[in-house]
Image: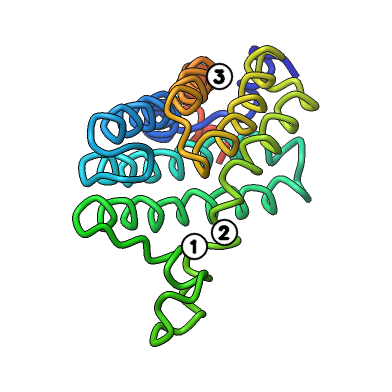
Amino acid sequence: MTLKDMNTTALSPTAARLHGWATIIAPVLLLASTLAFISEDGINDGVIGGATGVWSTFAFVVAFAGVYRTLEPRLPRIGPIFMALTLIGFTAGTAFNVQAMYYGAYGTDLLADISEGRLPEAPTVGIFAFLPWGLLAPATLVATGILLWVTRSVPMWSAALLILGGVLFVASRPERINTLAIIADVVLILAMAPIGWTLMRRKQVVSDVMATA
């Protein structure tokens, strides 16, 4: 399916703008979060970086809800499943960013403290507020890129960059590699900006909706 063919699954003008702008803004906010972290104490360590990261997760959820709306007609069985996994992954990202804010403010890494047994009074169930859900974010970036590639819903280079962005995301953030995290975010911007623009072009006017009804 080409960019032109994507218009066969039209969105309302409001939905097209909402999902489209979210797809463009989400990786930009992620880069802003990364730069803020670096200006504070490093990746996943800082109040400003964490707060901006929370906003980026909101945008990613809205963005990928729109992406999967366009994929569902071509992938009616697996599309909704991967949409759910993707949205769960980026929702979990909110927990990691709030954790980064506390780490920056108080020097407390709750996930590490619980998982390494430094807080015996804290139930280990707390780990499951973060894992394995947080791993879904980079994994589903890769999976979404593959699905977009297979369905030819976006240019192949855009899908390939989304896959690369997912790989770089998981390679940079757990190890807190600043330069690699910046590269990952820039790759995601290059991958997602054209997808967002395409979503905004897929609007359906109200009269068309009424005629169809």
Could you tell me how far apart the alpha carbons at marks 1 and 2 are, in whole angstroms? 6 Å
In primary-sequence order, the first of circles 3 and 2 is 2
Crowdedness of circle 2 by 10 Å Cα count: few (<14), some, many (20+)? some
| Three-letter residue code for mark 3 | Ala
Q: Earlier in the sequence, mark 3 or mark 1?
A: 1
19 shown above or below 101: above
At 47% from the left and 28% from the top, the residue drawn is 181
Query: Is any atom of residue 57 visible in this view?
Result: yes
Please tell me whether mark 1 sits on a helix, a strand or a loop: loop
| Residue at x 77%, y 26% (from the top left corner) | 151
Residue 117 position within the rendered picture, expressed as x and y whole percent measured from the top left: 49, 76
Measured Cα–Cα span from mark 3 to mark 1:
26 Å
Q: From the viewer's side, name the closer residue of 6 and 193.
A: 193
At which x and y percent is residue 213?
55, 41
Q: What's the mark number on residue 130?
A: 1
Query: Where does label 2 land, which residue?
Result: 133
Mark in the foreground, 3 or 2: 2
Q: Are marks 1 and 2 in contact (CB under 8 Å)?
A: yes
Numbered tag placed on residue 191 in the rendering: 3
- Horizontal arrangement in the rendering, residue 213 relative to residue 107 (left or right): right
